[in-house]
């Protein structure tokens, strides 16, 4: 059993303006739903500055509205858009460093993955991650050619990393 954290450092953080998460949330909040098609969503999100792979991934969290038999009457989000700020605040307040620094179990194995082109891990967090890895209970990896959205920036690299470290 393993727990993987993908470019989400274990320490607390504030989500306020300018970051990847905020950019995605702003783009999503600017849309009028329902939207006619998944293709229309991709076009709208790309027009708002999101990458094509990220915009395409966002189509996986749409729900089809019941149509008239000829197809969907449009698409809406599967999640409650208004709950995002509260969820981000709750996530940002979480500090798992004390838990990781005291962690002395072999299962579940904890794997922290950092985006090599990302800025989520500051110098202090990089040092802490390396210290917990040295103790042998946590693995700390870097996916060099990816930004924060590892799964869309470098899916093949993430899959390769996962396969290599889950043997």
Image (cartoon, rainbow, N blue to C red):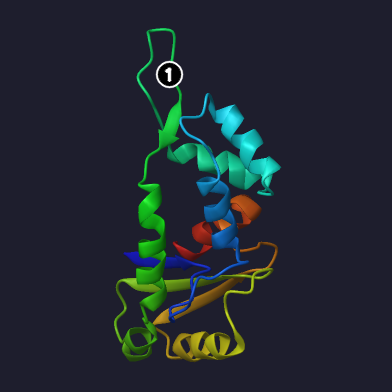
Looking at the rendered structure, the secondary structure element under dot 1 is loop
Is disc 1 surrounded by few (<14), some (14 to 19) or many (20+) residues within 10 Å?
some
Where is 97 relative to 81, above or below?
Answer: below
Displayed quadrant of residue 44: top right
Residue wearing tag 1: 72
Name, please, the residue furthest toward the top: 69
Displayed quadrant of residue 71: top left
Where is 59 relative to 18, above or below?
Answer: above
Closer to the camera in the image, 157 or 7 = 7
Kindly tell me whether residue 96 is visible in this rendering. Answer: yes
Query: How far from the left and from the top, in percent, is residue 158?
Result: 57, 57
How many numbered dots are placed on residues in this image?
1
Q: Residue at x 32, y 78 (%)?
A: 106
* Quadrant of the frame with the C terminus: bottom left
Closer to the camera in the image, 86 or 78 = 86
Left or right, 152 with respect to 83, comes to: right
Where is 43 relative to 92, above or below?
Answer: above
Kindly tell me whether residue 160 is visible in this rendering. Answer: no
* Quadrant of the frame with the N terminus: bottom left
Closer to the camera in the image, 55 or 144 = 55
Q: Residue at x 51, y 29 (%)?
A: 35
Closer to the camera in the image, 110 or 5 = 5
Query: How far from the left and from the top, in percent, is residue 17?
Result: 58, 68
Q: Residue at x 45, y 29 (%)?
A: 75
Displayed quadrant of residue 61: top left
Q: Residue at x 47, y 33 (%)?
A: 33
Where is 109 relative to 62, above or below?
Answer: below
Query: How far from the left and from the top, in percent, is residue 41?
Result: 57, 34
Query: How far from the left and from the top, in percent, is residue 95?
Result: 37, 82
């Amino acid at each position: 059993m393993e727990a993987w954290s993908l470019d989400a450092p274990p320490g607390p953080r504030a989500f306020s303006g300018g970051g990847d998460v905020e950019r995605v949330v702003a783009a999503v909040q600017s849309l009028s739903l329902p939207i006619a098609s998944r293709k229309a969503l991709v076009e709208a999100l790309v027009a708002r500055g999101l990458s094509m792979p990220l915009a395409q991934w966002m189509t996986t969290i749409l729900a089809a509205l019941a149509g008239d038999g000829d197809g969907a009457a449009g698409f809406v989000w599967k999640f409650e858009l208004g709950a995002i700020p509260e969820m981000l605040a709750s996530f940002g307040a979480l500090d798992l460093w004390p838990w990781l620094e005291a962690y002395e179990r072999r299962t579940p194995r904890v794997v922290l993955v950092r985006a090599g082109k990302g800025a989520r891990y500051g110098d202090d967090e990089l040092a802490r991650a390396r210290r917990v890895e040295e103790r042998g209970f946590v693995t700390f990896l870097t996916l060099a050619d990816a930004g924060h959205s590892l799964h869309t920036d470098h899916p093949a690299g993430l899959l390769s990393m996962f396969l290599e470290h889950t043997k």
